[in-house]
Image: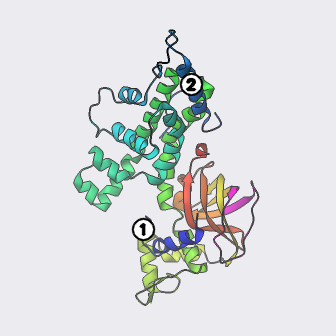
């Protein structure tokens, strides 16, 4: 990734622009993403090697083709506009699904990456006829509708992926351990997907944006007027409107801030979330190091090394231990970090 590009693209968001349930109740059943698919490949190879006994070279029929599996999934539902059919088409198109092998090996990625980072909820609802044109075209009505129905719609996708995995496992006689990771991901997705989907679009939030605008070199002048809230009244008004927060609250929370002492980039796992009325403290541990964003000295992090991150209090109920945050970070002299550019928010089971 290009961190400088990410910083540049986030400027409009910082100044007030916009950035471009429970688990399934089943007995959730390998540590590695492709293990179940590898086992399936072995079984398909065995099936292909079985002839009809007459010594001829005729190819044997596969145990289960993707088209047969697809028909099983949508049996009794002739409409290609049903939520299940649309999710299935999204899955097929995004990962070029043509066989049970490619399907099983991409279920976790579809759930933990595509549905969080790329899924267009509004377009999905429009295609499925789940929301009227009036709701789709009105930002306020749409936001309320999305807040009320997102979890329900994502649960449909998680259930569909579980049905795909179970059908494949049964057809190819896979053992429980052969697809345990996929099974667990489908179950956990019902709870974690809505939270990660919202965090991907709302983080890093007002407190982090204010700190980035205060300390980082970024263009904030538009039409000859500086729109940085730290430098202009117009900027304060824009910031308050964009983040629905009083600027005096931001100033009070950042009164003891000092300029960053270092910067770094990478993926971190949340180890603890401590919520309060003023802000939420998030403890994280380093997993992977990325290219530092620059402007301040680089800090090199070892795997497992801890950092402390402060975010708006509103995120306290959404962030969870185990979530993975990939971002560009700046650490102030107080050891508190803030994000200048967020890349991804994903559940732990994606890795």
The question of residue 300 being in magenta is answered with yes
Residue 233 in view here: yes
Secondary structure found at label 2: helix
- Residue at 50 percent across and 9 percent down: it is 54
Q: Quadrant of residue 5?
A: bottom right
- Residue at 43 percent across and 90 percent down: it is 224
* Residue sitting nearer the eye, 120 or 283: 120
Provide residue 12's location: percent of width, then percent of height: 45, 74
Is disc 2 surrounded by few (<14), some (14 to 19) or many (20+) residues within 10 Å?
few
- Front: mark 2 or 1: 2
Looking at the picture, does residue 254 appear above or below residue 309?
below
* Residue sitting nearer the eye, 65 or 6: 65
Residue 10 in view here: no
The question of residue 263 being in magenta is answered with no
Tell me which colouring the rendered structure shows. rainbow
Which residue lies most toward the top here? 54
* Residue sitting nearer the eye, 228 or 293: 293
The majority secondary structure of the magenta stretch comes to: loop
From the viewer's perspective, tell me whether residue 173 is left or right of residue 226: right
Secondary structure found at label 1: loop
Is disc 1 surrounded by few (<14), some (14 to 19) or many (20+) residues within 10 Å?
few
From the viewer's perspective, tell me whether residue 121 is left or right of residue 78: right
Name the residue beneath numbered marker 1: 18
State how far apart marks 2 and 1 are (Cα).
50 Å
Name the residue beneath numbered marker 2: 45
Provide residue 94's location: percent of width, then percent of height: 44, 46
Instruction: Please give the range of residues in magenta.
Output: 286-308
Looking at the picture, does residue 92 appear above or below residue 138?
above
- Could you tell me which quadrant the N terminus lies in? bottom right
């Amino acid at each position: 990734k290009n961190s400088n590009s990410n910083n540049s693209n986030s400027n409009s968001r910082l100044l007030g622009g916009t950035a471009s349930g429970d688990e399934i109740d089943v007995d959730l059943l390998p540590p590695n993403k492709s293990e179940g698919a590898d086992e399936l490949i072995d079984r398909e190879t065995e099936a292909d090697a079985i002839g009809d006994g007459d010594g001829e070279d005729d190819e044997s029929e596969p145990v289960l083709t993707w088209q047969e599996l697809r028909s099983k999934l949508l049996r009794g539902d002739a409409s290609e506009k049903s939520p299940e059919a649309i999710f299935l088409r999204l899955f097929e198109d995004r990962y070029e699904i043509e066989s049970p092998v490619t399907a099983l090996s991409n279920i976790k990625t579809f759930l933990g990456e595509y549905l969080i980072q790329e899924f267009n909820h509004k377009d999905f609802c429009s295609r499925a006829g789940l929301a009227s044109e009036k709701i789709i075209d009105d930002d306020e009505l749409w936001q309320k509708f999305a807040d009320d129905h997102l979890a329900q719609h994502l649960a449909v996708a998680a259930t569909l992926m579980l049905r795909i995995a179970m059908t494949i496992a049964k057809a190819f006689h896979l053992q429980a351990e052969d697809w345990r990771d996929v099974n667990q991901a489908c179950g956990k997705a019902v709870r974690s997907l809505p939270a990660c989907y919202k965090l991907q679009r709302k983080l890093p939030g007002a407190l982090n944006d204010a700190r980035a605008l205060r300390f980082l070199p970024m263009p904030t002048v538009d039409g000859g007027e500086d729109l940085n809230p730290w430098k202009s009244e117009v900027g304060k008004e824009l910031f308050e409107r964009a983040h629905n927060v009083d600027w005096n609250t931001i100033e009070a929370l950042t009164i003891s801030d000092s300029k960053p002492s270092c910067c770094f980039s990478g993926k971190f796992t949340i180890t603890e979330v401590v919520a309060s009325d003023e802000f939420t403290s998030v403890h994280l541990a380093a997993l992977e190091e990325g290219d530092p964003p620059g402007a301040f000295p680089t800090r090199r992090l070892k795997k497992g090394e801890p950092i402390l991150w402060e975010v708006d209090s509103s995120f306290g109920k959404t962030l969870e231990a185990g979530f993975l945050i990939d971002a560009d970070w700046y650490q102030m002299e107080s050891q508190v970090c803030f994000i200048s550019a967020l890349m991804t928010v994903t559940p732990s089971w994606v890795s």
